[in-house]
Amino acid sequence: MNLSIIGTGYVGLVTGACFAETGNNVICMDIDTAKIKKLQKGIVPIYEPGLEELVKKNLDAGRLKFTTDLEYAIKNSEIIFLCLPTPPGKDGNADLGIVFSVVKDMAKILKNIARESKSVVNKIIVSKSTVPVGTADKIKEIIAKEIGKYCENLKFDVVSNPEFLKEGNAVQDFMFPDRVVIGVNNSDSETVMRELYEPFVRTGAPILVMDTRSAEMVKYAANAFLAMRISFMNEIANLCEKVGADVEKVRIAIGYDVRIGPKFLFPGVGWGGSCFPKDVKALIKMGEENGIEMRIVKSVYEVNERQRKIIVEKMKRHFGKDLKDKKIAIWGLSFKPKTDDMREAPSITIINELLKLGVKITAFDPVAIANAKKIFGNQIKFAKDQYEALKGADALVLVTEWQEFREPDFNYMKSLMRNHVIFDGRNIYNPEKLKKLGFTYYGIGR
């Protein structure tokens, strides 16, 4: 099939590369000229395991192209995927300004295609961005209004196809999904979308077909529920500390209950990234607009906001409230491992709180330092490796659980640090082992 992907962020680039991998002809379009020039050379501007290899392979094979020309992308594709940013607005709702702006430009191009065509042209527009319920209907209205009298020459449909890609595992998630959700109101579009996704579900993953509004709600409901599990465990962790229980033992025990399961039960310093924060806020706003108070969802967000500062509170209890000129090493800056994404990362809140207290910070992250420098500039120092960050440190704060942080050389660490204190924001270390090695250890809920 001939596809176009409008927007080359995490979702758009992974979507385009993976569809090209199954033999489709894919045109990825973006207005960022510098980014497109890099992609045309096979240079991927984001860190995502396996993505660069996939892009280069399909670029060389001629199945994947990159352009800044929206008209070219639309004219040469049967299916048009909208993978556009929907950042949170000032009121917390998803800002659809970029989406509707692109749709209006696209509608004008479709109108010209319909006006010039001597036969019926078929187009399927797929909304892959996370958007409020009813957005697919609005997109359809915008296009229909623009086309007007030329509608007989253009047969189009708008489909909702939410993504469920985890940063750091996005390629794997796309190639081997646990389910594919397709929101359609047209049987012909359903047939086409099923055919497009058939190569990805050969191992038995279901294609779930529903109306567009239900499909749009699925993504919000899924993200809010996952965020709720994490926030719930963070509250349980905080209570465990007070009553002398170990949240790790509690987590493992409840995870064996088949009704609960073991995933997304890890307490820590809070969730972040491009999805959970904005989607939870958007769901709260969606409820307000429809007269439904989303009490649980509100609590999920509030708990997470408090959790981000819990490490700083632990540091105050250990060192005293005056932390001025303390030297603190930070391991991990990205919001999760295997990505350089700093959006809504807990490290930002922690570092900003420490800077307010006059703390001197040296940080290390395997891939996110370039993006962190854009945020902090020269307010903090950046180390070339994890051990350099520890030189003269009064404490280590582990924020992101990268694999290379799991089994460090603790004796070497002791030789580098001024005070042997570890604040483990992800509970990846064994408290008893560290105590025997001479460290003062603080975890979450332990």
Image: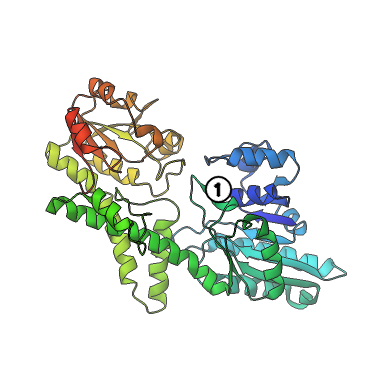
Quarter of the picture containing the N terminus is bottom right
Residue at the (71%, 51%) spot, across then down? 26
281 up-or-down from 27: above or below:
below
Residue 161 visible in rendering: yes
Furthest residue to the right? 118
Nearest the camera: 344 or 244? 244
| Residue 201, image x, y percentages | 62, 58
374 up-or-down from 208: above or below:
above
Nearest the camera: 171 or 261? 261
Answer few, some or many: residues within 10 Å of disc 1's Cα (few below 14, many 20 plus, some between 14 and 19): some
Residue at the (33%, 43%) spot, across then down? 347
| Residue 7, image x, y percentages | 61, 53
- Amino acid residing under circle 1: Gln
233 up-or-down from 335: above or below:
below
Nearest the camera: 445 or 80? 445
Residue 90 visible in rendering: no
In this picture the colour scheme is: rainbow
Nearest the camera: 390 or 360? 390
| Residue 181, image x, y percentages | 57, 65
Please name the residue that numbered disc 1 is placed on: 172
Choose top left, top right, bottom left or bottom right for residue 259. Answer: bottom left
In this image, 408 relative to 98: left or right? left
Residue at the (65%, 41%) spot, across then down? 55
Residue at the (42%, 41%) spot, across then down? 337
The number of numbered discs placed on residues in the rendered structure image is 1
| Residue 217, image x, y percentages | 49, 70
Circle 1: element type: helix
